[in-house]
Amino acid sequence: RVQALLAEYPASPWADDAQALLSGAADAEREVAVDALLGSDPARAVPMLQQVLAGTHSDRVKKRALFVLMQLAPAEAARAIDALLDSASSPALKRDAIQTLALAADAQGDAVLRRHYLSDPELKRAVIDSALVSARAELLSQLVGQEGDAELQAHGGRVLGALGQPDLLLQLYPTLRDPAVQRDVREQVPRDH
């Protein structure tokens, strides 16, 4: 796709950056090329960013591409992150993708986060932690309320406490079966509440 866009727009001010994506440029140069796409027409930039994400670029370059894609086309970014979370990408890139998606704080992103929380035990902690970025306390409360693992419930309770959500903690309390988790969650609620 990038080659086709270069053929169609050879005089584009972004042609050098597109060439850097296609060439064996170092990660720093690739990141600069990805960043330059922020000022580009989304119709041209989105396919290039999708190609970066589908390619063999480093996690660092892909993380930057996710961020830029989220800025240009949030719906496309959510779909790209959903696919990335289903792929064999590194755990670190998956955690970064979850954080990026959490920043969008929209219904489509919530659906992707919910699906991966429920289907991939390796991503649960990252989804819980993403609430600190997105302040999506309602979503976190729902997920933690359905969680069977006491350690993840306790972690979710601490995150809700950090978000200053005593009412949600009190709603969560009856769903907790482990006395230590109940105590931990109760400690997150201010005494005057």
Image (cartoon, rainbow, N blue to C red):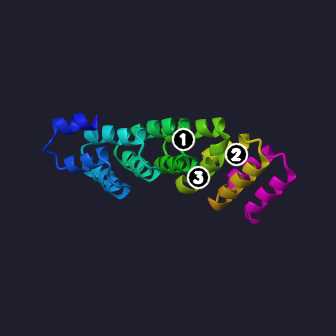
Picture quadrant of residue 121 = top right
Q: Of the residues under marks 1 and 3, which one precedes in the sequence? A: 1
Residue visible at 37% across and 42% down in the picture: 52
Residue visible at 78% across and 62% down in the picture: 187
x%, y% of residue 160? 66, 55
Q: Is residue 110 magenta?
A: no
C-alpha separation, residue under disc 1 versus residue under disc 2: 14 Å
Query: What mark, if any, has residue 144 been given in the picture?
Result: 2
C-alpha separation, residue under disc 1 versus residue under disc 3: 11 Å
Residue visible at 79% across and 58% down in the picture: 184
Residue visible at 30% across and 51% down in the picture: 38
Q: Nearer the viewer, residue 26 or 128?
A: 26
Q: Does the magenta stretch include residue 189?
A: yes
Q: Nearer the viewer, residue 34 or 19?
A: 19
Considering the numbered disc 1 on the image, is that residue within a helix, a strand or a loop? helix
Query: What mark, if any, has residue 110 been given in the picture?
Result: 1
Q: What stretch is highlighted in magenta?
A: 167-193
Considering the numbered disc 2 on the image, is that residue within a helix, a strand or a loop? helix
Q: How crowded is mark 2: few (under 14 residues within 10 Å), some or many (20 or more)?
A: many
Query: What mark, if any, has residue 131 been given in the picture?
Result: 3
Q: Of the residues under marks 3 and 2, which one precedes in the sequence? A: 3
Q: Farthest bottom residue?
A: 191
